[in-house]
Image: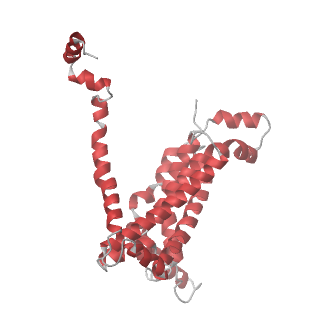
Amino acid sequence: MSTVPGAASSIAEIPLKQRLAARGLDGLTLLVLPAVIFLLALFIYPFFYGLFLSFNPKAGGALANYQRFFSDSFLYGTIATTLWLAMPVTILTLLLAIPIAFRVRLMKNQRLLTTILVIPITLGTVLVAEGLLNYLGPQGWFNRTLMAIGLISSPVKLLHNYWGVMLSLVITGFPFTFLLTLSYLTGVDPALEQAGATLGAGPWERFKHILLPLLLPGLAITFCLSFVQAFSVFPSAVLLGAPAGPTRVISIAAYQAAFEEYDYSMASAVAMIMGVVQLAIVVAVLGLRGMLYRGPAGGGKG
């Protein structure tokens, strides 16, 4: 089949910019390139490099790092320890965020109250830990006040244990969970509740049959994001917990492998296991959401 000379010349006369735009490569599309490069440089490449490194141990076969991890209870026990912290914290922050978000959305000073509630997220984990040490530590204000009024004779151990880390994670995780919950809640059309009230449904019935089904997809996503944030705990477990005992989370195991044993291959393997555990929980939650609800992940107005 021969090419028509006239057609070829007409195509050649079309500017290159128009030809690229016809294939979807216009100026607006090219704006995505910096984000793609950033994603490749800071996320995709490090992940695959870490995965490659985890299968190149200092000694033994390709799976030596993973065999070492799952054969040592001091190492694989960190998975249960981290889950024992992350799951209760995620559930608690979500249970706190839901009623508070319901209340805040009905108030006139919503912006002011929201700003106050999210202040802890601006402080960072380390500053929150230092604040808890000053308030709840053995020589903190709380213990000194109780001893001054004669309620206790010696300081109560509130930190450097499981509860200290959990409290820190709740304080730093609640603003994030609250903002996500509030965003989904404000997306539900108030006319739906008003219609339910008109038909005689009480507050609990409206929540159970109208709001909860619409919020469930968003709450599942909020749970996943909050869980991932809590699962990666490190500063709180070191500053407010017992990093060699009850709060030796999996991130501490990765840190010790990298910067105490200088075994970056083993540290990469621990990081990969950490990522797989998080992914498994996220997939399970989203799968459960799919069984209970199929539709858009939000209520939506209009």
Residue 98: horizontal and vertical position, in percent? Answer: 61, 52
Decide: is 78 above or below 170.
Answer: below
Residue 135 image offset from top left, x and y in percent: 46, 74
Q: Position of residue 292 (x, y in %)?
A: 66, 48
Q: Is residue 50 left or right of residue 16?
A: right
From what the image shows, is residue 29 above or below residue 107? above
Does 189 sit above or below residue 137?
above
Furthest-top residue in view? 6
Q: Quadrant of the C terminus?
A: top right
If the image is split into quadrants, where does the N terminus sit?
A: top left
User: Most extreme residue toward the front, as rendered?
Assistant: 1
Q: Residue at x 35, y 68 (%)?
A: 54
Is 68 located above or below residue 289 in the figure?
A: below
Whether residue 146 is visible, yes or no, is yes
Q: Position of residue 220 (x, y in %)?
A: 58, 51
Q: Is residue 171 visible?
A: no
